[in-house]
Each structure stands twice: as structure tokens, then as C-alpha cells.
Amino acid sequence: MHRGKKVRFDSSDSGLTLRFLGANRQVTGSCHYLKTGGARLLVDCGMFQERAYLSRNWEPSSLRPKNLDALFLTHAHIDHCGLVPKLVREGFRGPIHATHASAELIKILLEDAARIQVEDAAYKKKRHRKEGRRGKHPIVPLFTEKDVRRTLPLIRPVHYGEEVKVNDHATVKFYDAGHILGSAMLEVDVRTGNGMRRLVFSGDIGQRDRPIVRDPSVFAEADYIIVESTYGDREHGDKEEDVEVRLADVIVRTVEAGGNLVIPIFAIERAQEMVYHIARLVSARKIPPVPVYLDSPMAARATEVFRRHRECFDDDAWHLINSGHSPLRFDGLRVVESVEESKDINRLKEPVIIMATSGMCTAGRIKHHLAHNISKSESTILFVGYQAEGTLGRQIVSGSPRVRIHGHDHEVRASVEEIHGFSGHADGPALMHWLSHFKKPPRHVFVTHGEEKASLALADNIRRDFGWDVSVPEYQESFVMGELGVEG
């Protein structure tokens, strides 16, 4: 088992260790281990999705899960909570804390992920047997529905601003991250050998002025900051007012060409945001009548959670609701549940819009729709979210002339478009703006959740503009404050 390296620093502190177990110099697999003299906490437990790191999902935990006091989840995306059932199977029995909205979404996501894991393993095993070959990774599901059933009773929903007391050594408070419904930043107060220390985990920081959800919270002080850097080296080119104009243009051009518009989506937030924008375009008659298929049972269930948790909505969403317009419904929207209904979409002769998961094209129904449309010059593949290195989505958006889907090569003849303004992540300038609210220098900043280039760029900007001490951790790297810090 690769255990990484230890770095000892800040000798004025003692009894505090941070270990980085994912999303380090890459984007997915977010997981941070925090240990004090009397508490062992885990922040997020996400699945790795980049092709180069998939094998990490099957590795046994490098921790002792049964010794963890609690798990805190920042939000319900697979790269932040996707390995929780595996952690439970390995012995974790502590409470899992998440916001009320996240708790509902996590249930939906994990149940769906378990089904996909089992189905994909069976499909892959059948294909390999037919082709007489073996794959790189074991053809077994990471976890099953039984593992999820053992996980769900451990979840303890909390409100924003509510303080969770782990024990006499640690308390945690949740704040709105503005990323997806229920997403949170964590303010963690821990007792060390030299008194109390405060850590702020940014989670995924949303953009300001996005539809539906509120703006991200800001903080005035922290001893240690763990900040994401997905777009740490760039600025979103598309502003909010341009997003619908560009979306309408892509829809009109594709329909006029007689093709289908295929949009890989994340079932939570991006699906609802796309419905929100298309509903506005339909209402304003800025696009032609065209059937819109939301081909994701999980996205449909998640949308119902959105409707139940209006306390997370921003003022613009409430304005639509109060004026009698639903931000998540419109004529022409068709929600697809069954596999047969999903297959029927690709038998249609007239142009349609297809939104299907997963957002990075790593699994699920989107791969079938891509297989049917990616070689058609009249069709368009539209990306509205981040595509991690090594994913099928990244290959397509990077201009690969051929891609492999379900074991077969496909020429990319469809138009490939990208609208960055839909991103649920703050860009580089917005991340720096978020950090600027801290009134005094922290003891240290750790930059995570970004490809190496993006993380290093943000770290350089923090040093240049603020003069703060910054590290970009590597996978499994531990930072030990003071002379204590025994791991395990």
C-alpha cells in the first residue's frame, strides 16, 4: 500500500495531522483525513473518475475505518461521496454528517451508483467473455445495494449554521458553498496541544449569481484553509447573460441541421440548471419546438428533492415561483425512467435534445446516446461541465478524432461544443476573491481538487497576492503539525 510521505511543519502546533487521500493534483476522489489528539475525522470519501486513477477505487482504505469518529460530506457528487459504501463495508460505523438536502441527494446517488456498478460489471463481464479478453481492472462492482442499505442509517442530516459536536476535541459547522443544492463548506474547530485551531474546508466553491442556489459563504478567519482549485488557472469565458444566448444558438443550429443535441449532465444541479435555462428559452420562444428528454431516473428523483428544498433557493428562483412559473418544468420536457424508453429515443427520426448522465461520460446512459450520435455530422455534443483528465468526456472535448465506447471505436463527426458558463465551480479570480475575505493570514493553505497545473497556478497566485504559506499536497501526503502525529 502506497502511504505517501510525511511533512512536519509549524512546530508551534502539536497533535494535529492532515492527510490527503484524493483529489490531489487531480480532480476526483476527494478525501481528507484530520487527526487531533482526541478525534479522527474524514472529510469526503469520493470516487476516482480519471482513467489513470481508477485502480485507486479498488484499493483497501489506507486508514482503519472502524477507528474514525465521524465522516463529514460536503455535497452529493460522486467524486465526494461515491466510496462511502465501500468505507462502510470495510468497517466504518460512525455517523455520516451532511446537510438535509445533501442527505436526500446522497441516498439517491448511492442507490443509483450501486445499480450502475452492478449493471456495468455484468455488461463488461459479458463483453469480455464474448471477446475472449481480460480488462485492466477487476470486473466486480465497487459496492452493491446491500452496502448502500448498511450506509444510509448512518447519515445524520444537519442544517446550515448548525454545530456538530464530535467530542470534546472537535466541532464542525456547515455553511452554504453555493455549488449544488445542499453543498457545504466546513468550519472545523479542533483542540490541539497548544489550544484551539480552526480549519476551513472549502468543498467545491460555486460561482456567484448562479441560478437556483444561493451564493457561496465567506469566512473572516482560519488557521488552516483547504481550498479547491478546479478552475484555479483560468477564467470562465461565458458570463451569465451569455449562457442562454449560446445555448439557444447551439439548439437552433442543431435542429436546423436535422440532428440531435446530446448533453452529458451531472444528475444533481447541472440537470436542474439545464432544465431551468431551457424552460426560459421555451417560454421566451427563442428556440423551436423540440422534444427534450431527461434520460436519468436519478436526475428526475433529484429534481423532486430540489422542489422539496426551496429553502436553498436564491431570490431569482423564488421570483419565478412567486410569479407562477416553475423553474424546473416546461412543456416538451419528458422524463425517461426505463431502459426501454431510453433505447426508444435513439429510434426517433426527428431532432431531439437528450440530457443524460454521467457528466464526464464515464458510465451510464450517456455512453449509449454518444455511441448513436457521435459519428453523425448533423448532431452536436454539448459539454456544460468540467471534464476531468482521462475521462471519455475529456477525450471528446479535446478533439480526439476517434473514441472508444463500450469496446468499439467511433469516429467523431458530430459537432463538439462547450459552454463554460454553466460550471458549478468558481474560476481563478473568484477563488482569489473568496480567499480575500480572510482578515488575517492563515498558518497555512492547502490547495486541492485541481489538476496539477491548475493547483500550482492558484498556489502561486496566493503567494504573490497574499504572501501566505501554501502547499499543493500529493496523493497520500501527510502534514504533521508539531512533534505528535502518529497515523492510523
Image: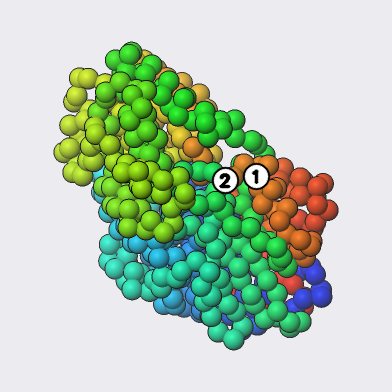
Left/right placement of residue 28 relative to residue 128 reads right
Identity of the residue furthest to the front in this view: 323
Which residue corresponds to the image point at 16% horizontal and 38% vertical from the top-left? Answer: 340
Where is residue 267 drawn, in percent x and y?
36, 46
Nearer the camera: disc 2 or disc 1: 2
Upstream in the sequence, badge 2 or badge 1? Answer: 2
Residue at 72% of width from left, 42% of height from top? 457
- Which residue extends farthest top? 257
Give the side of residue 13 with respect to residue 448, left or right.
right
- Figure quadrant of the C terminus: bottom right
Quadrant in which residue 359 is drawn: top left
Question: Helix, strand or loop at disc 2?
Answer: loop
Rendered position, 290 above or below 91 = above
What residue is pinned by disc 1? 430
On the image, the x and y values in percent for residue 470 come to: 76, 56
Secondary structure under tag 1 reads helix
- The answer to whether the residues at label 2 and label 1 have Cβ atoms under 8 Å apart is yes
Q: Which residue is mark 2?
A: 208
Q: Quadrant of residue 416?
A: top left
Of 289 and 351, nearer the camera is 289
For badge 2, the amino acid type reads Arg
Residue lying farthest to the bottom in this orientation: 168
Mark 2, other Cα within 10 Å: few <14 / some 14–19 / many ≥20: some
Q: Nearer the viewer, residue 76 or 121?
A: 76
Residue 433 is situated, as x and y percent measured from the top left of the image, at: 69, 48
Give the vertical position of 240 relative to 85 (above or below): above
Relative horizontal placement of residue 10, taking residue 333 as reference (left or right): right
Q: Residue at x 41, y 45 (%)?
A: 319
Mark count: 2
Image: 20 above or below 192: above
Find residue 391 and report its horizontal and vertical position in percent: 47, 39
